[in-house]
Amino acid sequence: MKRIILIKYGELTTKKDNRGFFIKTLKKNILNKLNGFNIEIKDDYYRMFIYCNEDDISKIVDVLKSIFGIHEIVICISSEDTSISNIKKISLDVMKKKDFKTFKVETSRSDKSYPIKSMEINNIIGGHILKNIDCKVDVHNPDYLLNVEIRCEAVYIYEERIKGLGGYPVSTLGRGLLMLSGGIDSPVAGYLTIKRGAKVWIKVPQK
């Protein structure tokens, strides 16, 4: 069991046949930005996983917030033991550290061979939480949302979700030159262009 960083792609998933190129570029950009950290990155068609020292997680997240192409940054606990008893234990350990009155459990199973269906897992985990913590279930507007993602290789239980910049990874669209003026329009245009995947050089006119 370990804490890792999970990356959700967002718009990259719309690219179909070209998705591999976009994911490869995003991984390259992340590695460049995280140069100096002791990390290992694993990726597939749907997710990217960053394994690092626990003490570096918050620093790495701060860097990831500035990288285009990331829809969501998730700090989660991963475990290769996907048994329901282990999922119950980890879920309770996570939620004992949180301050909430109402909660909701959401489960997704990319591993469709898992013997228990998502709704049933929600009920099992939710019942376990209710027996051990003084709280209530609220499926519409909970104080705390616990996400459980079951994949073939491991189970991932979300602790914290952080919104990324979105868009496409820089260098996937092409190159451009941005002429900066004294107003706000040109930097905003540059930002939006970079967000769509362009690599932009900035030129400040000489007085």
Image (cartoon, rainbow, N blue to C red):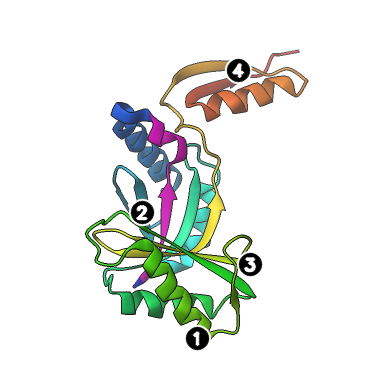
Q: In front: 11, or 48?
A: 11
Q: Which residue is mark 3?
A: 143
- Which SS class for mark 1? helix
Q: CA distance from mark 1 to mark 3?
A: 18 Å
Q: Which residues are magenta?
A: 2-14
Q: Which residue is mark 2?
A: 49
Q: Secondary structure at mark 3?
A: loop
Residue at 27 percent of width and 68 percent of height: 80
N-terminal label among 3 and 2: 2
The residue at the far bottom in this view is: 132
Residue 185, located in which quarter of the rendered image? top right
Q: Which residue is mark 4?
A: 178
Residue 56 versus residue 14 in the image, above or below: below
Quarter holding the N terminus is bottom left
- Answer whether labels 2 and 1 touch (C-beta < 8 Å): no
54 left or right of 19 in image: right
Circle 1 Cα neighbour tier, 10 Å, few/some/many (<14 / 14–19 / ≥20): few
Q: Amino acid at mark 3?
A: Asp
Q: Position of residue 48 (x, y in %)?
A: 36, 49
Quick one: label 1 or label 4, which is nearer the N terminus? Answer: 1
In the rendered image, residue 60, in percent from the top left (x then y), is placed at 49, 55
Tell me the tag on residue 131.
Answer: 1
Q: Are marks 1 and 4 in contact (CB under 8 Å)?
A: no
- Give the foreground label among 3 and 2: 3
Q: Residues within 10 Å of mark 3 (few under 14, many from 20)?
A: some
Nearer to us of marks 4 and 2 is 2
User: Type of residue at label 2?
Assistant: Phe
Vertical placement of 122 versus 28: above or below?
A: below
- Amino acid type indicated by mark 4: Leu
Real-space CA distance between mark 4 and mark 2, rounded to the nearest whole angstrom: 34 Å
Among the two numbered marks 4 and 2 on one chain, the one whose residue lies closer to the N terminus: 2
Q: In front here: 190 or 90?
A: 90
